[in-house]
Image (tube, rainbow, N blue to C red):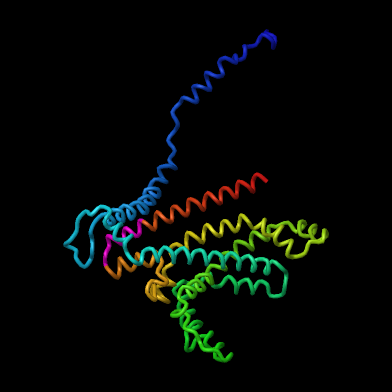
Amino acid sequence: MQSPSTSAPAASPATKPRKAAGKAGAPQRFNPIRLLQTPSVLLLLAWMIVPLVMTIYFSVNRYNLMAPDQTGFVGFENYQFLLEDPAFWPSIGNTALLIGSVLAISVIGGTLLAVLFDQPFRGRGIARLLVIGPFFVMPTVAALIWKNMIMHPVYGMLAFVMRHLGMEPIDWLAQYPMFSVIVIVAWQWIPFAFLILLTALQSLDTDQKEAAQLDGAGPVRIFFYIVLPHLKRAITVVIMIETIFLLSVFAEIFTTTAGGPGTETTNLTFLVYAIGLQQFDIGIASAGGIFAVVLANIVSFFLVRMLAKNLKGVNEK
């Protein structure tokens, strides 16, 4: 009868790495989940790549629907025609003006509304629903409401108010077209900024506000030194998302001003539409589409870097 001390010796430490190495070097088993994901991934790639490849193809070829027999490779000639188009550079300026103005109005308005609706008052839930409402209105419907019911120089609401004040009604879409489009688009995007900023504001610790009030800080100081720094990350998210969507504003311009008068409200998206579906030049319109894609990617790159830097700074704190 053997004593416990004379039992079979345990495996030496030198043998353990060999077993681990053998397991690490063994071929991995096939994961059937990857096979199930393959169709969706291929469909997603086809959904993105095929239109992009076709657009690139048409952008380097001559293709006008009014002369379908005159086709052929032209290289960068379509891009040259686009850059020389008298409406191209004004459209770039209008796009930048539209995006910058709507961002300023929506961020400032959304911040003020978020601070206001963060305070308790009777009927706050119904008031929040009314503020959020414009975000769920389709762009075409919103443009028609503003064009025919609010800004119309004869039977619009603004004309009615101005006549009762003894003032001459203004044809807003004719005299101030870009300002009118900015107001319509901002009216739709303020609720989005309001939702994001109100959600971020509700996560602010009330102890900080109470401590600041005990130290004698007023509402203005609390807003600039406590509330606004807390909303910095949310504001960055709002700017990034809105900028990407505002690059493709079309329905509001098409419904109200049709890019006019002249090129007063023609942005890059409407210019591509006008060249492709009004002048029937698919080649130059495709070149404009590629330019819009490149511009959107450049803007998105810098916005994502700005957001990442902001998040990194917050995490380090």
Quarter placement of the N terminus: top right
Residue in front for this viewpoint, 124 or 106: 106
For this orientation, the residue located farthest to the left is: 69
Residue 194 is drawn in which quadrant? bottom right
Q: Which secondary structure dominates the residues rendered in magenta?
A: helix
Is residue 285 rendered magenta in the image?
Answer: yes
Residue in front for this viewpoint, 135 or 271: 271
> How far from the left and from the top, in percent, is residue 314?
64, 48
How many labels were placed on the picture? Answer: 0
Residue drawn at (28%, 58%) of the image = 78
> How far from the left and from the top, in percent, is residue 72?
19, 56
Residue in front for this viewpoint, 141 or 237: 237
> How far from the left and from the top, in percent, is residue 243?
50, 60
Left or right placement of residue 290 versus residue 147 in this view:
left
Left or right placement of residue 171 versus residue 193 in this view:
left
> How far from the left and from the top, in percent, is residue 201?
67, 60
Is residue 256 rendered magenta in the image?
Answer: no
Position of residue 230 relative to residue 175, above or below, is above
Left or right placement of residue 206 versus residue 266 in this view:
right
Residue in front for this viewpoint, 131 or 169: 169
Residue drawn at (48%, 66%) of the image = 97
Magenta span of residues:
280-290
